[in-house]
Image (tube, helix red, strand yellow):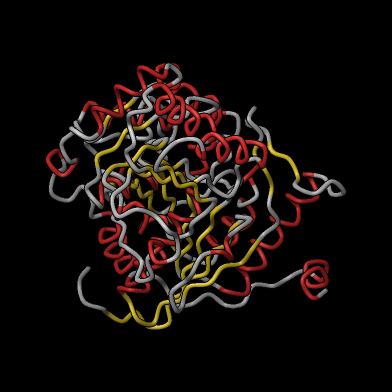
Amino acid sequence: MPSTKRLEHVRILMYSHDTFGLGHFRRCRAIAHAIVGRFKGVSVVIVSGSQIAGAFDFRARVDFVKIPSVIKLYNGEYDSIGEHISIDEILMMRKQIIQRTAEVFRPDVFIVDKEPLGLQGELEPTLEMLRAANTRVVLGLRDVMDAPNLLDKEWRKRDVLEKMAKYYDRIWVYGPQAFWDPLQGLKVPEGLYDRLKFTGFLRREVPTQSALEVHHIPEEYILVTAGGGGDGSTLMEQVLSARELDLSDDTAMVMVLGPFMKTENRERIRLRASSLPNITVIDFEPRMEALLHGASAVIGMCGYNTFCEVLSFNKRALFVPRVMPRQEQYIRANRARELGLSDMLTPEEASIPKVMGQALERLVQMKDPAASLRNGDLDGLEAICQDVEYLCGNTVAAPPPIEVSSQQAQLFDQ
């Protein structure tokens, strides 16, 4: 990263809806840390629904505002975590907290992660308000969002593309253009593509405090990770089945279950792993970068963060992607296999112990992904910082305070 510069009194607000897993919040945190590392005088606040945002460390001048959490069910619907409060009440609270935060913080730049209108449209009042105040508004999209037919069906119901054209000054795509276009196959409004900026993947760094100092793990190991772990138990058990089929394989493995894995699944995995040699099971580690950096190879589901870490630390990887309710991980893993960046099994293939075992044998013989990467493919954070500097250099003077209704004032003064 280039030397530190100063942007005087710049405020950046980020939004991460966070309903399932850790991907959105971890991506926002990586971007926020890169920005404050590059620029003095910048403060970043992340508005997040992550249940475990407080488990992560933050650099100076980065903070977060926790909004009430919701959960995403396997059918794609959302529900309240608490038994005595409805999803409608939760969404109203979230909407008002987000808007009030924006009113008080008065950001120069507002960065929205992945959901153009927020969860169930909760961002629209804030987007309207900030556009009127001449705040620069940026949407950040993953390299892959979903299969075009599924994304079109989801977005068309709410006129998402038209509203993207209305609200957003810039759209960052967190990947190289040659890897994937998340808007391909959609009817994109005229002029919207002109606002797209393909940044490259977001390079990750090893934290100063290593997770290896905390956990008792071998010097050389294969890391098995399923992100937040909410639907990761199947992958863990598929790997265990392959090891049970070939008891002569004593390659050291470290399995990180994730904070959202169900208790009964954790217990079953721990019991099976205890009867096999050289398998270490860890419930949760917020410094996953350190564990991944120390691994000889990686087995995962091909979520965006894990994929970026595999490329950043030049690790051989086998991915078994989620295929429901989104095709995102499958598309990413398949495209990465096409480009020689990693190997892949479908969930059906991985469920056959012999096939999984053969894939594990291939894993140790694969070439490193660096051989297939091009210059600039991992320069996403640098491209983002450059664009933040440009956007802040072209912002108007800080907007005046926005009038708050008495009803809103009462809600947040309580």
Using the image as rendered, state which of residue 215 and residue 333 is in the foreground.
215
Please determine whether, in this image, residue 302 is positioned above or below residue 22: above
Residue at left offset 46%, top offset 69%: 12
Hey, which quadrant is residue 403 in on the image? bottom right
Q: Is residue 239 left or right of residue 249?
A: right
Q: Would residue 383 be found to the left or right of residue 104 on screen?
A: left
Residue for point 40% across, 25% down: 242
Q: Position of residue 384 (x, y in %)?
A: 31, 59
**Quarter residue 409 falls in:** bottom right
Q: Position of residue 174 (x, y in %)?
A: 34, 47
Residue 290 image offset from top left, x and y in percent:
35, 59
Q: Quadrant of the N terminus?
A: bottom left
Compared across the picture, whether 206 is left or right of 82 comes to left
Tell me which residue sits at (60%, 45%) in the image: 260
Relative height, residue 118 to residue 352 (above, below): below
Count the marks.
Answer: 0
Q: Position of residue 168 (x, y in %)?
A: 45, 51
Left or right: residue 413 versus residue 132 is right
Q: On screen, 65 above or below 283?
A: below
Mark yes or no: residue 274 visible: yes
Using the rendered view, name the quadrant where residue 354 is placed: top left
Q: Is residue 116 visible?
A: no
Which is more toward the observer, 341 or 12?
Answer: 341
Q: Nearer the viewer, residue 44 or 155?
A: 44
Where, quadrant-wise, is the C terminus in this rendering? bottom right
Front residue of 337/328: it is 337
